[in-house]
């Protein structure tokens, strides 16, 4: 009978193993819930063309001529700010090609490794309306000249040395690779160009094959006050940009490609991609509002253009920019030989 009883040590071992198994089972975490998967599936897809701001359609505007402007244009000291741009407008032209107005959203962050040496902390000062110009926004320094068919805006010099991807960016976006920064939203500049007769084309396409940007040619004209002499100075934007191959000023001109849109598949909202900063570009971007009608890489080690330092006024200088669409077909034909800096 004693031989049929289990060994006492075996009994103890069984008890110990049973206790361990129970402890392991009680320590297991709960399985993932379906809610986790739903959250992941609803995330907005990331892309280098995904915008960061929500747009809403602008109100219609009437762009009727007012009194002629006086020359030279008056300049006034302004400040720039690091806050997001307020895009409330009093008027905007109604046009089916006009981009939609952004609502409040995130402010695009500047690369702090190459932060420009210019004050970006104070609110921009709203300037008085120059004679003959019609203001497009009650919160931004942007006008149209209905008589001379120009869009007029105010910028500040933020960079004088280094490679360029843009001539003009939006404030607090790409100041580390742009000569000037503008304190107005891109969609509003786009709307102003439509109001003065510019024809929107198509932005650059890279695949399946390269197709250059198209649209009305737009002259970018500059005016500023010499900080040393106080004299009014004028130049073309090309004069501040140097071709890295030839060492000469840029010969190419800009066309009104009009940027492009990205649609959120979840909310069905459309975003105007130029709001990420690509206002007036010298490297090709599908998001550029104004682009060059030539092949110009955006690769940092192969940039085609850099800042023409000795021609650019000091950092912080206020610059008035006039965007003038070229509507004379003969003038476009005469300047066709200057469309490529490679030639």
Image (cartoon, rainbow, N blue to C red):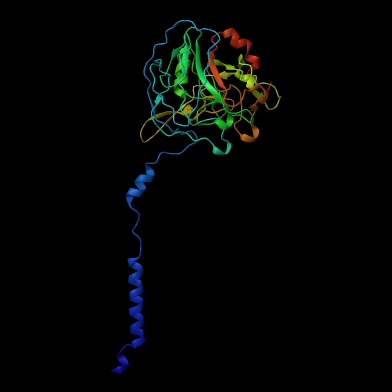
Left or right for 80, reference 2: right
The image quadrant that residue 16 belongs to is: bottom left
Q: Is residue 23 above or below residue 149?
A: below
Q: Position of residue 63 (x, y in %)?
A: 42, 10
**Outermost residue to the right:** 246
The image quadrant that residue 51 belongs to is: top left
Left or right for 195, reference 116: left
**Outermost residue to the left:** 1
**Outermost residue to the bottom:** 1
Q: Position of residue 70 (x, y in %)?
A: 52, 7
Q: At x 54% / y 28%, what residue is drawn?
A: 285
Which quarter of the image is occupied by the C terminus? top right
Which quarter of the image is occupied by the N terminus? bottom left
**Outermost residue to the front:** 229
Residue 207 appearing in the image: no
Q: Along the line of sight, which residue is nearer the eye, 18 or 318?
A: 318
Residue 176 appearing in the image: yes
Q: Position of residue 106 (x, y in %)?
A: 43, 34
Q: Along the line of sight, which residue is nearer the eye, 178 or 327?
A: 178
Q: Is residue 103 above or below residue 216?
A: below
Q: Position of residue 228 (x, y in %)?
A: 63, 19
Counting labels gives: 0
């Amino acid at each position: 009978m004693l031989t049929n009883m289990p060994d006492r040590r075996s009994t103890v071992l069984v008890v110990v193993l049973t206790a361990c198994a129970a402890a392991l089972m009680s320590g297991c975490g709960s399985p993932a819930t379906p809610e986790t998967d739903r959250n992941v599936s609803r995330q907005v897809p990331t892309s280098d063309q995904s915008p960061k701001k929500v747009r809403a359609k602008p109100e219609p505007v009437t762009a009727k001529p007012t009194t002629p402007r006086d020359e030279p244009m008056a300049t006034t000291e302004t400040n720039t700010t690091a806050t997001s741009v307020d895009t409330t407008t009093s008027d905007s032209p109604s046009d089916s090609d006009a981009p939609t107005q952004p609502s409040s959203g995130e402010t695009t962050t500047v690369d702090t490794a190459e932060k420009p040496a210019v004050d970006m902390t104070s609110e921009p000062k709203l300037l008085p309306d120059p004679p003959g110009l019609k203001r497009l926004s009650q919160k931004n320094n942007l006008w149209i000249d209905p008589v001379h068919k120009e869009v007029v805006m105010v910028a500040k010099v933020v960079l004088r040395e280094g490679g360029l991807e843009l001539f003009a960016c939006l404030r607090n976006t790409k100041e580390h690779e742009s000569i000037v920064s503008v304190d107005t939203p891109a969609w509003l500049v786009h709307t102003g160009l439509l109001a003065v007769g510019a024809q929107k084309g198509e932005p650059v396409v890279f695949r399946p094959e390269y197709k250059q940007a198209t649209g009305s040619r737009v002259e970018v004209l500059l005016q500023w006050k010499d900080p040393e002499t106080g004299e009014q100075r004028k130049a073309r934007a090309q004069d501040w940009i140097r071709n890295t191959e030839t060492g000469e000023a840029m010969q190419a001109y800009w066309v009104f490609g009009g940027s492009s849109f990205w649609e959120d598949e979840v909310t069905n909202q459309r975003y105007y991609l130029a709001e990420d900063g690509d206002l007036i570009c010298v490297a090709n971007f599908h998001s550029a509002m104004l682009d060059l009608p030539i092949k110009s890489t955006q690769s940092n080690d192969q940039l085609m253009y850099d800042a023409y330092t000795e021609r650019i006024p000091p950092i912080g200088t206020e610059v008035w920019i006039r965007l003038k669409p070229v509507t004379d077909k003969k003038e476009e034909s005469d300047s066709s030989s200057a469309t490529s800096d490679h030639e």
